[in-house]
Amino acid sequence: MKRRRFILLAAALLAGSLAISCGGDDPTTPSPDPDPDPQPERSHTLIVYMMGGDNGLETFMDNNLGKIMSAADAIPDDGHIAIFYDRGNYTRLTELIVDNGIPKQRVIEEYNISQSTVDPQFMAGVLDKIRQTMPAESYGLVLSSHGGGWVPSDIFDLYLNQSPSTSAAPRPAPRFFGQDGYDCMEIPDLVKALSGMHFDYILFDACFMASVEALYDLRKTADRIIASPAEVMGSGFPYKEIIPLLFTPDHSLPEVCQTFMSLYRNDSGTISLFDCSKLEALAQSMKSVMAVGHSPADVSSIQGYEGFDPHLYFDLEQYVESMNVGAQLLADFRKSLSAAVIWHDNTPTFYSDYGSRGTIALPRSCGVTCHVPHDSYPQTHAAYLETAWAKAVGR
């Protein structure tokens, strides 16, 4: 983990109140059940893991928690919703229940607020606690915080603080997945934290998580992943609408993505659904491309997904096209890409708060980003070469 600070929007979960009920109780008063009994195994447990401690997302996450609680009636008899929320002034694990028609949170455990919730051992412990107290045949995971995909936090800060649009004073940034105060969780740490469980799906309510390098690291943690190649607006996902979908037998993940796009259709939205079992084949296809292709001389010809110049996140398909590898190899790559990215959509423009800031045209997108080498920041390429994706594709 690297020490980092930060500002800005990425994505969150929302709440009208974090009291045991939705009625406005003081959120600091609930006391945990000292020894909650494990419940009978059910069909599906949805885990919502929110990292909002001292990172600017608290209001967004409060609002989103309220949306989640408003969907409590959608929890089937054979389902659980576990909510972990680090808000900064408290850190708590609860189960969402309905008591006499009123949505409430049954407190499972309170944690010391000094505990770093991006520590992989801590996160693994929380997930194990959920598995013990809310066992199920299958699990789904929503991860909500700041995000930056594969890019190490110090590299992101380098781009941020050298951007022409930033002021003379360094502008702190959040990255990679998850932030607790000054602590950030790098993707290898996230993989380590999740390694004790396997999920039917992981939904990232966080920016930039549809980077192929990060997805490749995460390929063994879940069957499917929903993530955005660009920034996710602070209001996050429409939880009241998507929670009933997540409890259907197949979790209705394309419909979850469609519901997300319906919310942002007239604003700024990019979302993709990945089949993790196809990411290894995608890497092998990319290896064939890299064996004969060459990095483009002009990276400005490839779609970027933020306002930096040059970009940190580039369109993977357009990168391959720029290498002029021939019709057959390009067709083979596109076949592997379409197998891995099983659903994606985007608005014709998107908003970026980074670099030049403002609205960026997105006339075409494959739904997944990648690193493209360029001369401006050699540190970025050096960091990229240490990723599992880079090693799998040959460079």
Image (cartoon, rainbow, N blue to C red):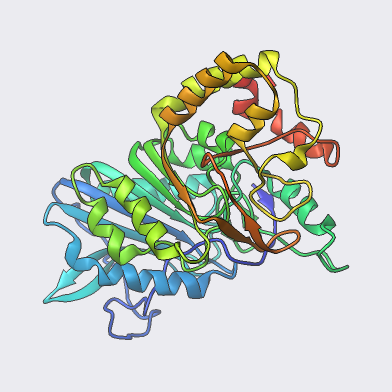
Q: Nearer the viewer, residue 110 or 16?
A: 16
Quadrant location of the C terminus? top right
Q: Nearer the viewer, residue 132 or 237?
A: 237
Q: Position of residue 268 (x, y in %)?
A: 53, 62
Q: Nearer the viewer, residue 150 or 351?
A: 351
At x 44%, y 30%, the residue is 338
At x 19%, y 56%, the residue is 37
User: Farthest residue in the right direction?
Assistant: 168
Q: Position of residue 304 (x, y in %)?
A: 67, 46
- Is 87 placed above or below 373 here? below
Q: Position of residue 160 (x, y in %)?
A: 76, 57
Q: Examine the rendering and report whether any part of residue 204 can be seen.
A: yes
At x 50%, y 56%, the residue is 347
How many numbered discs, if any? 0
- Is 231 placed above or below 367 here? below
The quarter of the displayed image where residue 31 is located: bottom left
Left or right: 332 with respect to 382?
Answer: left
Q: Position of residue 109 (x, y in %)?
A: 35, 62
Left or right: 69 with respect to 207?
Answer: left
The quarter of the displayed image where residue 195 is located: top left
At x 50%, y 75%, the residue is 59
Q: Examine the rendering and report whether any part of residue 108 can be seen.
A: no
